[in-house]
Amino acid sequence: MFKLTSLNLNGIRSATTKGVHAWIEATAPDCICVQEIKAQAPDMAGRFEVLAGMKGYFQFAEKKGYSGVGVYTRHEPSDVIVGFDAEEFDAEGRYVEVRFDTPSRKFSIISSYFPSGSSGEERQGAKFRFLAKMHAHLMALKSEREFILCGDINIAHQQADLKNWRGNQKNSGFTPEEREWMTKLLHKTEITGGLIDVYRQLQPDTTDACYTWWSNRGQAYANNVGWRLDYHLATPTTAALARTESIYKGEKFSDHAPITIGYDFAM
């Protein structure tokens, strides 16, 4: 079983003070995709380049203490692709793709951190530009290789994916446009779709149990007023190999919970 975890750290230095390193050692995933590292290369050197025996590959944001993504893996990649949009979003540290190609298979694991638009219209506009570029990128990638994209997508797709769906229909993360983007991406027959929401494939009906993010305001975590923002999005052949899922809430490493899916294949 290939165990793949995704976790928005909300700062790698903060998360390591809250026990995430020991948890990763204990759960021993094959790979862990991380988002919001909130660090630059000098901050990582000698401290976080290797985590629980896994080597990391990263894209850092130019802005200090902001964004940044990584993939830690026990397996030697055949190639590493850092970034997907040099024009705008690579400067924000939002995409790293680790490839494990063999003569018989092309396969990638991607860690991505989608923008939040909650700070206002300017960032919501940036989010829509990101979604358009990411959709085109994933469709092109799907035509040539198998992949799993793990990350904080910053979108709750359906009503079951957040507690207070009625009150959030005009808020970033649950706007009709964002939800439609997800619907298009996951469409089973249209050429503009074809990806699989792996958690929902395994757990089509969960509501309260599916949340992976809680606001720090009020008693959101204590009352489980959450959102499902963290996904495994996979090509169909790979998604069909998913067997187990787990959202770990036993400890709080950040404002997100790690989601782990077990796939029936080996590197």
Image (cartoon, rainbow, N blue to C red):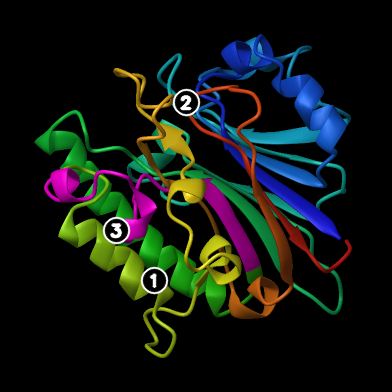
Tell which circle, 2 or 1, labels the residue nearer the N-terminal end: 1
User: Amino acid type of disc 1?
Assistant: Leu
Q: What residue does disc 2 label?
A: 255
Tell which circle, 1 or 3, labels the residue nearer the N-terminal end: 3
Depth check, front residue: 261 or 81: 261
The residue at 39%/29% (across/down) is: 223
User: Residue 233 location, x and y as percent?
Assistant: 54, 62
- Say whether residue 219 is left or right of residue 188: left
Query: In the rendered structure, does residue 9 fall within the stretch colored magenta?
Result: no
User: Residue 177 location, x and y as percent?
Assistant: 18, 60
- Say whether residue 13 is left or right of residue 179: right
The residue at 42%/46% (across/down) is: 229
Q: What residue does disc 3 label?
A: 159
Which label number is shown at residue 145? Answer: none
Q: Which residues are magenta?
A: 147-170
Report helix, strand or loop for mark 2. Answer: loop
Tell which circle, 2 or 3, labels the residue nearer the N-terminal end: 3
Crowdedness of circle 2 by 10 Å Cα count: few (<14), some, many (20+)?
Answer: some
Residue contact between numbered discs 1 and 3, judged by CB atoms under 8 Å: no
Which label number is shown at residue 185? Answer: 1
Report helix, strand or loop for mark 3. Answer: helix
